[in-house]
Image (cartoon, rainbow, N blue to C red):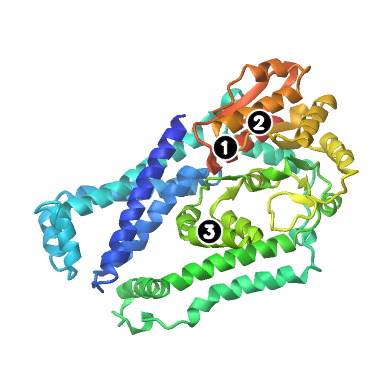
Amino acid sequence: MLYGLIWSACRLVCAVSLSVFIAIYFFLAIPSDYEVQPVWLIAQPILLGSVILSWRAAGHPIRSLGALPLALLILFAASFVQIVTSLLNRREAIVSYSKNFPDPRWHELLSRLGPDGPFIFFLGATGGVALVLILGAIAALYARFWRVGKTGMTLRNLSRRVRETVANFGDAPSLFRLLDWYRWKGWIAGAAAGAVLLLPLLLPGREFQIPGTGGIYGALPDLVARLVTFANDRLLALTAATIVALLLWRLARWLTLADGRIVLDADKRPPMLLLRSFRDDHATVLPIDLWRRLLHPLLWPIRFLLFMIGAHGLLISVRAITRRRLEEVAARSLTDAGPFIAVGGRGEGPPELGAFRAHVTDDEWQYYVKRWLTDARIVVLVAGLTPSVRWELTTAAEIGALDKVILLIPPGAASEIIARWRYACESLVGTAWHERLIRTDPRSILAVRFAEGGRIAAISSWTRSERQYDLAVRIGQGIVVA
């Protein structure tokens, strides 16, 4: 709960800081062609980068807990605290410097804050970023040393235990052995994604019209000025090219993925199995990535247009750019633990990334699922409301594989979560786990791990975003392996 509270505070302050940065920089500074000093030109990307670094450090539970990311985060936090301290002693210089700004909107905005408006604004902006960095550092440090439940291990130790256990089962096959080289359309789509990203380079811009200051101390400001001007002159083109390239790259990844049974033949490690209702293939969660959140409102008109014309395949692909599918979160959390497979749906068309799809007939899918339940090291089962999910949960209990299962409760309304939970309870009637499940309130539960003697380990959270589900799957995986 403490980690979640710190993360929520960091996210809020980060969103406010980023909004202020975008509003001032793109709507006031750039339209006025204001000539800033070299030190401020260098400070702008550092300011933006520090906010994004803090967001990632607080949000990613494993990758950002290393010594180097933490050291950088603490260094940035200390630097901005020092900047805030120095600003307190330069009130008159800041007010005088602000008077040279040619855009009257700037002065009108700051005049509402009183005679010391520029000082209040700069102190608030840098203080906000400093607060973001401090909260991000606290969240990252807390996550680094937090011990998971009764395991007594930190997240990093739990992750290392999983990697060591996986290594004992042999190495994974080469990535190129898991690609379908004969699907030439996928390679064309991948090349097209790269070409689309290069198209904005062909557009005219003003970056080469900026006179160089010369000298070793002017090289970095000149480079930053040209890059900022390049991005500003092609902002809309770069945004559109990035969106199209992401769609093409997603299509290329899907077209070149091999069938799940081919992956099982190439990778001799015990498989990781995904069981779910096909209707839950499109369950999405709020993503960690800041750029996905920023793109979400921008792509709303495109999503509405695709919905109106009935292009549901493209609609799913566009939505996947700004929202993370629950299956993809589970796949990333189980990285390198083994081949992650799932039964493919009949006539599956739009790109579905995450688990490798094994396409089987309606008559044989139960045979393969039962076989994979026996062989699998970990089973991720998304709680659903279909007979197939009930059969899978009941079968896992009958063959003694329930201790491998991580039962995920997808996001939704409280009534839907309760309905999924009750359906899972009914599927386990007559087992030792039924009474424990039926007495548990599921509204805050993300995942459940089953243990011997009817015991369960419930992983809960206040919110249901990518970060929480990523942690839930990682903890559940660690408990299974440990």
The spot of residue 262 in percent (x, y) is 84, 54
**Where residue 98 appears, x then y in whole percent?**
16, 63
Splitting the image into 4 quarters, where does residue 319 fall?
bottom right
Q: Is residue 380 left or right of residue 37?
A: right
> The residue tagged with tag 2: helix, strand or loop?
helix
Q: How crowded is mark 3: few (under 14 residues within 10 Å), some or many (20 or more)?
A: few
Where residue 181 sits: x, y (%)?
A: 79, 67
Does the residue at mark 3 contact the one at mark 1 (Cβ under 8 Å)?
Answer: no
Which callout, 2 or 3, points to the residue nearer the camera? 3
SS state under label 1: loop
Query: Can you see residue 120?
Result: yes
Q: Which amino acid does label 3 sit on?
A: Phe
Q: Do the residues labelled 1 and 2 touch (CB within 8 Å)?
A: yes
Q: Mark 1 points at which residue?
A: 412
> For the residue carrying disc 1, how many other residues have a C-alpha within 10 Å: few (<14), some (14-19), or many (20+)?
some
Q: Mark 3 points at which residue?
A: 304
Q: Mark 2 points at which residue?
A: 420
Label 3 or label 1, whichever comes before in sequence order: 3
**Of the numbered discs in the image, which one, if any, rests on residue 82?**
none
Residue 417 location, quadrant = top right
Q: Which amino acid does label 2 sit on?
A: Arg
Which quadrant is home to the C terminus? top right
Using the image as rendered, state which of residue 398 and residue 47 is in the foreground: 398
